[in-house]
Image (spheres, rainbow, N blue to C red):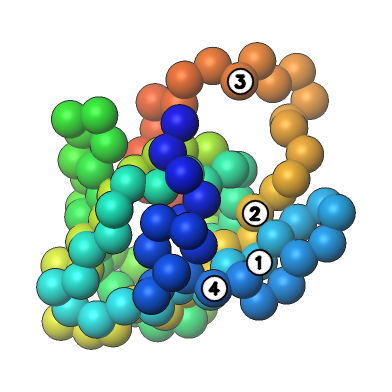
Amino acid sequence: MAKDPVETNPEHYRVVFENDRVRVLEYTDSPGHMTTEHHHPDSVMITASAFRRRLSSNGKTVEVELPTGVARWMPEQDHSGENIGETDTHTFFVELKEDAPGSSREPVVHLGPDEP
């Protein structure tokens, strides 16, 4: 499993709130910036800016483009990312600390946020 994004990419991720149930991360970067591989538990991602990114994991790549002000479910995953757009990325992740009911902790195969 990849490591905590705050440890692997401290120039991009910072903890803005944490308690025993959730952790909220803020993420920022500029066009062309890349992250090293890191892990996200089940999360809700909220976009504070519009952005385009390329996410990669285990030989699989997906490009995502999201507008400002949307919330998306992001299932647990490991990935690295690259800002492939022309704007800065600014987003928040509300990470859940509890496993989903019936969770088996099998390898994650999903990459990127879910569609609405």
Q: Which residue lies under the disc numbered 2?
A: 95
Q: Position of residue 5 (x, y in %)?
A: 46, 56
Residue type marked 2: Glu
Which of the two residues, 44 or 56, is positioned nearer the viewer here? 56
Which of the two residues, 49 or 12, is positioned nearer the viewer here? 12
Q: Which residue lies under the disc numbered 3?
A: 105
Give the spatial CA distance, label 3 vs label 1: 22 Å
CB atoms of marks 2 and 1 within 8 Å: yes
Within 10 angstroms of label 2, few (less than 14), some, or many (20 or more) residues? many
Q: Which residue lies under the disc numbered 1?
A: 24
Is tag 4's residue or tag 1's residue first in the polypeptide sequence? 4
Q: Can you say which quadrant of the picture contains the N terminus?
A: top left
Give the spatial CA distance, label 2 vs label 4: 13 Å
Q: Which of the two discs, 4 and 1, sits closer to the camera?
A: 4
What element does badge 2 sit on?
Answer: strand
CB atoms of marks 4 and 3 within 8 Å: no
